[in-house]
Structure formats: C-alpha cells, structure tokens
Image (spheres, rainbow, N blue to C red):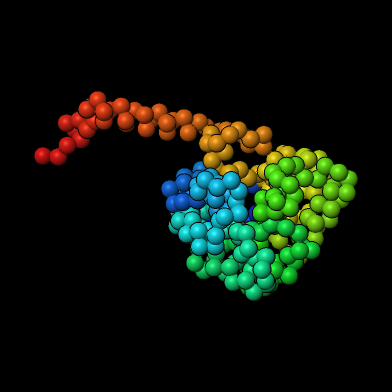
Amino acid sequence: MATQPVTVPALLDKKNKGEKICMITAYDWTFARIVDRAGVDVVLVGDSLAMVVQGHGTSLPATMDQMLYHTGMVARGVERALVVGDMPFLSYQVSVEEAVRNAGRFVAEGGAQSVKLEGSAEKFGDEIRAILRAGIPVMGHLGLTPQSIHQIGGHKVQGRTEDARARLKHEAQALEAVGCFALVLECIPADLAKEIACALAIPTIGIGAGAACDGQVLVMHDMLGFGKPKKMAKVFGDVRGAMQQAFEAYVKDVKTRTFPAREHEFE
C-alpha cells in the first residue's frame, strides 16, 4: 500500500491519469484505521451515521457536535487517506457565516482536511465560495441528496427525465465553476453520470451512478452486510454474520462454563 498522504491535488491528478478513486465512510477510530490501511483514498465521515450508528430513519438528525465527535475519532485513526467531514443538515443552510464557521470547526476541531455539502451552486454558491476563501476544500453532492428527501419525495433515482438530466448536468458544471474539488453523484442513471464525468475536469465519485464515474463511495455498513441489501451496494464480506457467530459462541461458552478457562485466569 502506498504511504504518501492523499491530497486534493492528488485526487485531481488521479482523474487526469485515469486512476480510479476509492472512497468509503467510517465513523470511529477502529474502523478508520482498518480502511486507511486497506488503501482507500478518501474517508468520508458521513451524516449517514444518524442511520447506521444511531438508528434513525434518515440522516437529518445528525448534529454538528455529533459529526465533530465522530470526525475527530476518524481523523486520529487515519494516516494516509483524505478525511472529508460531511456537513449535516442546517450546518450550512442558515447563512454564509454559519457555513464558514461550521466548515472551520470540521478542520480545527475535527481534524478533517475538507468538507462535503449537498445541493446546487444556485442554492449554495455563496456558502461554497466563502468556505473556499477560508482555505477549506469543498466536495459537492448532486442527484439523490438525502438532506432534501422530504422535498424530492424520498430515496429514489434522480435525473430520469430530459429536464432533470439537463438540470443535473448544468448543476454539476456550476459546482465545478464555483470551486468544488470533486463531486459525489448519487442514484442517477449510469449514462447521465458518464456524461457528467466526461464534461468535468474535477473527479466524480459515484454511489448508485455506474462505473463511468472517476471513483466510487460506499457506506461501510452496506458493504459489510449490515442492514437490508441495496441495489447500489455490494456486500464484500459478511462481517455481520461473522460477528453474530462470535457473539453467540461467547454467550454459549459463558453459559456452559467453558469460558473463562484455566488459561484465562491469573494466579
């Protein structure tokens, strides 16, 4: 595994060289160390923690304090990958000043090297420019934007009509123009994602957006077999099943008095 730290310019270089970018979510020190040593390029501390860690039905309940708490754990576990803090609901929508302050907290308090926020440049261009002026790289996010699920009608594929396709292509180009260093494309048709990837100089990171994106991102819990199967995710290892077996074996050994054994005792 390469040991050179991944930087924003390094990701741009990967796109120019045709090298795929691998991004994954993590939420604590233990798993951050594992994914970093596996060779991922980017670790996203996603607001998805509200769902996969806290048990909520959406990402909306995640707060800034919670995001900073988890980002700090991840940053302490990562030595090589670029750490991206996912700006939670209402951390950047209220005002430009709040957006800059909260983005700065991700860097100063959380140890992240960049932040991600959802939405178009039309809505949040001023916020993105201000965050960039503060010296903080910004990753954009289009398509299915989970913080807007009540507005878009739930978790469903975006960009299926001609008008929607044209709008997403325009919004992607606008986010590049405003200064985003990369763009997450979530749950859009694969051919549309390919068109966007080809039209942009910055990397596109897909999730449910096909193979033509410059990179891919998955929620860690999805790829490890936790939760319901998702069309856009692949289970790369049944970690949930292995954990269940281990816990059941522990319970059995304790109840049958085979653990602790003599070798686990102190004189």
Q: Which of the two residues, 4 or 20, is positioned nearer the viewer here?
A: 20
Residue 148 image point, x, y percent: 70, 53
Residue under the image location 54 percent in, 68 percent down: 105
Given the current orientation, which residue lies at the most extreme right position? 162
* Left or right, residue 100 beside residue 157: left
Q: Quadrant of residue 129?
A: bottom right
Height in image: 66 above or below 233? below
| Residue 22 in view | no
Residue under the image location 54 percent in, 50 percent down: 49
Residue 199 image point, x, y percent: 82, 51
Figure label count: 0
Height in image: 93 above or below 146? below
Residue 127 image point, x, y percent: 70, 68
Residue under the image location 81 percent in, 45 percent down: 159
The C terminus lies in which quarter of the figure? Answer: top left
Residue under the image location 61 percent in, 43 percent down: 218
| Residue 216 in view | yes
Residue 114 image point, x, y percent: 60, 61
Given the current orientation, which residue lies at the most extreme top position? 256
